[in-house]
Image (spheres, rainbow, N blue to C red):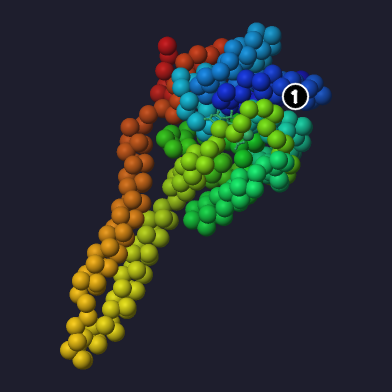
Amino acid sequence: MGRKVSMVIPVYNESVNVGVILQAIRCEFKNLDYHYEVIFVDDGSSDDTLDLIKEQALTYDNVFYLRLSRNYGHQNALKAGLDNAKGDCVISMDGDMQHPPSLLPKMLAFWEQGFEVVYTRRLDTEGVGFFKKLSSKLFYKVINFISDVKMEDGVADFRLLDKKVVAKLKEFKETDLFLRGLVKWVGFNQVAIDYKAAQRHSGKTKYSLSRMIAFAVESVTSFSVRPLIFSVYLGFILSLLTILIYIPYLANAVMTKNHFPRWASILSLVAFFGGLNLTLIGIVGIYIGKLFMQSKARPNYIISETNKPIKEKIPAHDIVEF
Ligand code: UDP
Ligand code: MG
């Protein structure tokens, strides 16, 4: 028998999908020579997702669940799964069948060839609206423009990580997690697989527009201080422009002794610099906020219930025992 594979699946109100994805995974592993475990991370679902997972866990002894004490978000749920996975490699995938389990053999084959990170690239999602497509394109364009870590279009949290990489990721104590970026950042031998994403098996997306915007801000501010530098440039250029605009007026006033309307110039200056200040303070504020959150060093999640022994080397502050 081969090495051990941990599957990590964050689920948030995915009741119908739990059984479906589990069956699909079982099917794939039937033809593969690996031990495997499936870890569902229930990210505070309010439907019967947890009950259905528990049912499966009774039937299959390689099915585990980690119930988070509330909804901590996809990234933190993933981290909880990674922290508690014991396999020689960990494969993370969404619980809605948008990440095809049929890619598993190919991912594992790359791993056997010595790749430590096998990530996947979504080519095109069937049945996904124009807006979501556009926003995801824009998302990567903006991130790559503004951020220090380059990311590829369509790379989601469907990937295989060798245990070496997982061990490194476990050491990360970032409050604001953006795993896609972190995985790219840690390096190692990486390889990509392209796939065509399917539609959600059931239910609807948990990423609303506001969540997507929050995600985009997260991905930039957790990887780059470039917005701070931008703001300095912006401030400098705007100030320069103001001076240039006012030079002719000033010259005119001096030469011809005609006054130009002072109220207009004062008003525009006040409004202009007021806006500029707000922008810059806002950007600085985001980073200060991050320092504040990080300085509290709160855990990324709290596990309230599990059928998995979680005593191993996980840093003590990640687990609150009940
Ligand atoms: N998810 C989660 N916590 C959340 C939101 C989503 O664990 O707060 C899970 C969700 O159940 C799914 C995966 O993360 O398995 C991806 O979410 P979704 O399909 O809604 O995102 P999309 O595919 O639309 O980007
Ligand atoms: Mg999805």
**Above or below, 80 relative to 129:** above
Q: Residue 241: image x %, image y %?
A: 34, 74
Q: Splitting the image into 4 quarters, where does residue 315 fall? A: top left
- Identified at 56% across, 33% down, the residue is 206
Q: Residue furthest bottom?
A: 255
Q: Residue at x 31, y 59 (%)?
A: 275
Residue under label 1, please give it.
Answer: 24
Q: Position of residue 55 (x, y in %)?
A: 64, 10
- Image quadrant of ligand 2 equals top right
Foreground residue, 89 or 262? 262
Q: In front here: 69 or 110?
A: 69
x and y percent of residue 254 in the render? Answer: 19, 88
Is residue 290 left or right of 185 when viewed as pictured? left
The quarter in which the C terminus is drawn is top left
> How many discs mark residues in the rendered view?
1
Decide: is 220 above or below 65: below
Disc 1 is placed on an element classified as: helix
Say if disc 1 is inside 8 Å of ligand 1: no
Q: Nearer the viewer, residue 187 or 304?
A: 304
Q: Depth check: 199 or 20 in front?
A: 199
Residue 301 visible to the viewer: yes
- Could you say where residue 208 lies in the image, as x and y percent from the top left? 53, 38
248 left or right, relative to 189? left
* On-image quarter of the N terminus: top right
Does 265 sit above or below residue 9? below
Q: Amino acid at mark 1?
A: Ala
What is the quadrant of residue 126 in the picture? top right
Q: Residue at x 57, y 53 (%)?
A: 138
The residue under the point 33% across, 50% down is: 282
